[in-house]
Amino acid sequence: MIPLSGQALGLRDVVAVARHGAQASLSPAARAEMERSYAWVCAARDGTMPIYGINTGFGSLARVRIDAADAATLSRNLLRSHAAGVGEPCPDDVVRAMILLRANALARGASGCRPALVDTLCALLDRGVLPVVPQQGSCGSSGDLAPLSHLGLVVFGEGGAARFGGRVLPGPEAMAAAGIPTLVPEAKDGLAMTNGAQLTTAIAALASFDADRLVRSAERAAAMSIEALLGVRRAFNPAVHALRPHPGAVESAARVLDHLEGSTLVDSMPEKVQDAYSLRCTPVVLGAARDTLAYARRVVEIEVNSVTDNPVMLLDEPGDNHAFSAGLFHGEPVGIACDTMKIAVAEIASISERRLYRLTTGSLSSRLPPALAGADRPGLGLLVPQTTAAALVSENKALAWPASVDSIPTCEDQEDHVAMSTTAAWRLREVVANSQRVVAIELVCAASALRYRLGEGAARLGRGTAAGLVVVEEESSRHEVPGELIEAVAERLARGDFE
């Protein structure tokens, strides 16, 4: 059970809930803070002081006063009007992560809503009710309004749809079947549910975790290729990288060397003094990716434990009005981080494809069979998997174009600069998936090349490369069709079997 306080959630917690069924609940201290904030909102709702979204309209209608008796209707209408998402439903892991992150943001106690709202979100996770949330319709400002509204429809029994028990049901039916009472909206509930960047952050958190795993797997794949191509070890010497001490490059060089430890294939051609860039520059390129991913991970970790509501309730600030309207919902920090991650991950795949191209090109492979065609693949080899990798790398180039530099004003120019962060996050997810498959293709090709080297005579593989070969061979014994093998190896990579 993961306690939610709004301040201590980690990326591994997000993955545990999103993909492995872990549960979450509101911490006692957070419950008390939420109650305190909620009490102030209830008192302020009936007063004369205008407070955005509590006794006023929304967006460009912020100057329209709303009677206290209509506060629940205001929340209900907000959910209904903003549930305008379109397109394919979000994947289950993204929906679960989004629910968790919204619950954690509200748990901070700065949104002025009831603890019951967080309790209900946690019950969705506990009992497996997943609202159907369309992927498209968010500009990332004011947060992910449309996607979160589709979540809100289910929570408040206002309609929508949800997956439960292997079926898609109307939202109220799914909640009833799971034994979760729907809530009656109150003041601030609708705004608290919808105002935040939790869809963007959910995608980004999962992708950041996967990208970190990918770069470590790519280092093992690179070591296997370098070994199969009879590479030169000196390019990874720690003293070399101490001269240009980017932390990621130093770490990547050390990991490649560790994987090659004990190999008799590297440095086996005395006349070779250096390798092509895709081999000897591997630590520099993957190291740059490591450093970029570290920056983006810090941004996402902050966002996972942030309040992204508007207004926020700061009860300890002086004065009578503790509601502060600001722009914490704006998706720019996460959007830029996603765009930056896209570039880094695309480069992981780009240099991976260049190494596997050398493995499959007879004139570049230090006398490996052209296309790695052996007795088991006469006249065919692994040419087409390299073509697949080239297609994926090219697709990544288009997806890597930064979405966060775009902006189209919305809401009658009240929202006159938007982040397009959700687009950046979805594209990042695609780039990560494409790159997992590219590195999987390199692993398949490198394993084939290493088997050939071992068949040439007495040779010993490095401790890390030998372990990587075992995993690929396990899947090779189960899958004869190349596409099926690539997908199986990519799945093993996503599980962390090549880290």
Image (spheres, helix red, strand yellow):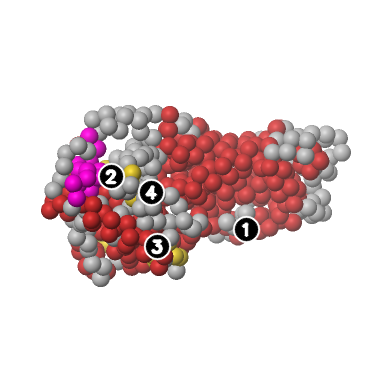
In the rendered view, tell whether residue 408 sits above or below residue 264: above
Quarter in which the N terminus is drawn: bottom left
Q: Earlier in the sequence, mark 1 or mark 2?
A: 2
Residue tagged by mark 4? 317
Closer to the camera: disc 4 or disc 2? 4
Q: Which of marks 4 and 2 is nearer the N terminus?
A: 2
Label 1, label 3: how many angstroms apart (C-alpha)? 45 Å
> Residue at point 76% right, 39% down?
241
Residue lying furthest bottom: 179
Position of residue 233 measured from the top left corner of the image (x, y, whole percent): 79, 42
Position of residue 460 measured from the top left corner of the image (x, y, whole percent): 79, 54
Question: Which sits in the foreground, 38 or 16?
Answer: 38
Label 4, label 2: how many angstroms apart (C-alpha)? 32 Å
Position of residue 374 measured from the top left corner of the image (x, y, whole percent): 66, 46
Q: What stretch is highlighted in magenta?
A: 47-60
SS for callout 4: loop
SS for callout 1: helix
Question: Which sits in the foreground, 35 or 455?
Answer: 35
Q: Which of marks 4 and 1 is nearer the N terminus?
A: 4
Residue tagged by mark 2? 146
Residue tagged by mark 3? 30
Question: Which sits in the foreground, 412 or 398?
Answer: 412
Mark 3: which amino acid? Ala
Closer to the camera: disc 1 or disc 2? 2
Q: Which of marks 3 and 2 is nearer the N terminus?
A: 3
Residue tagged by mark 1? 471
